[in-house]
Image (cartoon, grey):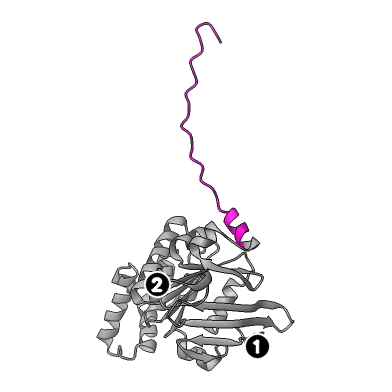
Amino acid sequence: MTGAIYEDGGAIRLGDEPLLHVRDLRVVDRTGGSLLDGVDLDVAPGECLGVIGSSGAGKSTLVRAIAGLIDRDRFDVDAERFSFEGRSHGAPRRRERRRILGRRIAVVAQDAAATLHPMLTIGTQLAQVIRRHRPECRAKRRVERAVADALDGVGLDPAFARRHAHTMSGGECQRVSIAMALVGSPSLVLADEPTAGLDVVAQQGVIDRLVTTTRAHGAALVFVSHDLRVLADVADRVCVLDRGRVVETAQTRAIFDAPVHHVTRALVAALPVLVPIEPAVEAEAAPEGVA
């Protein structure tokens, strides 16, 4: 998205402080099982960082830990350093989470339909988010205008404000989720496999809208995916997770052209290879008298 230059394919953009700077992030459940084990991560302002790994690698846990959504009654979360927008603190606590979540950090979940209230219209739900994160939008007309602008920004007609989630397709619900995430003008958007469960056409539409809208807002994007081909089109860099650890982070092109870690090589090797279909050759007619 940005064409940023990184040292060693890695963590810090030259001449710029990372928007998000995480060192030795750990998430451990109360039985001693480790979900994240010493994760280091940097996200530069305006960049798209792709995160990939096999099922159970810790991708969703990483998103939830950054957003401060880990259940502290079940898991211990700790980090040697956690810096966001130049402010240093530990992994986000409940009070800090309420301050930054939605306003400065936004999350686009896997199943948007499940996150939308089934009894409230889309407009009502967007209005609630707008009133919470945009104090300047208090008057009814300003809120209605902001709702219409948010829907238009993700390619939906403002008339969708009167609809309910169960009357919409999966792709439309995901676009509403993107609108809700961006309505507070966050500086970081965390997208946790936002196209899971969608058909191919809907997937491409959601990906295009998420990337272009995030770029238009000037926000950085952490895009979690199980499909390396998707990240090839949208990510500036790719971070590879395996069993709760970051095993490789590099420029996207380098991940494909010169993967270093064996897990990364396996992910690249597993990509389908398109083989051109040769045109059918008509069989020669048999000579007369030959059955």
Residue 95: x percent and y percent?
A: 52, 94
- Outermost bottom residue: 95
Q: Is residue 163 visible?
A: no
Residue 20: x percent and y percent?
A: 49, 82
Residue 223: x percent and y percent?
A: 49, 70
Q: Is residue 161 left or right of residue 257?
A: left
- Between 6 and 267, the one nearer to me in the picture: 6
In the image, residue 178 above or below residue 202 = below
- Between 9 and 141, the one nearer to me in the picture: 9
Overall secondary structure of the magenta section: loop
* Quadrant into which the C terminus falls: top right
Label located before the other in sequence (2 or 1): 1
Distance Cα–Cα, label 2 vs label 1: 31 Å
The residues colored magenta run: 264-291
- In this figure, which residue is indicated by the disc labeled 1? 73
Q: Residue at x 55, y 85 (%)?
A: 68
Q: Residues within 10 Å of mark 2 (few under 14, many from 20)?
A: many
The amino acid type found where label 2 is placed reads Val
The amino acid type found where label 1 is placed reads Asp
Per the image, is 265 magenta?
yes
Q: Residue at x 55, y 86 (%)?
A: 82
- In this figure, which residue is indicated by the disc labeled 2? 176
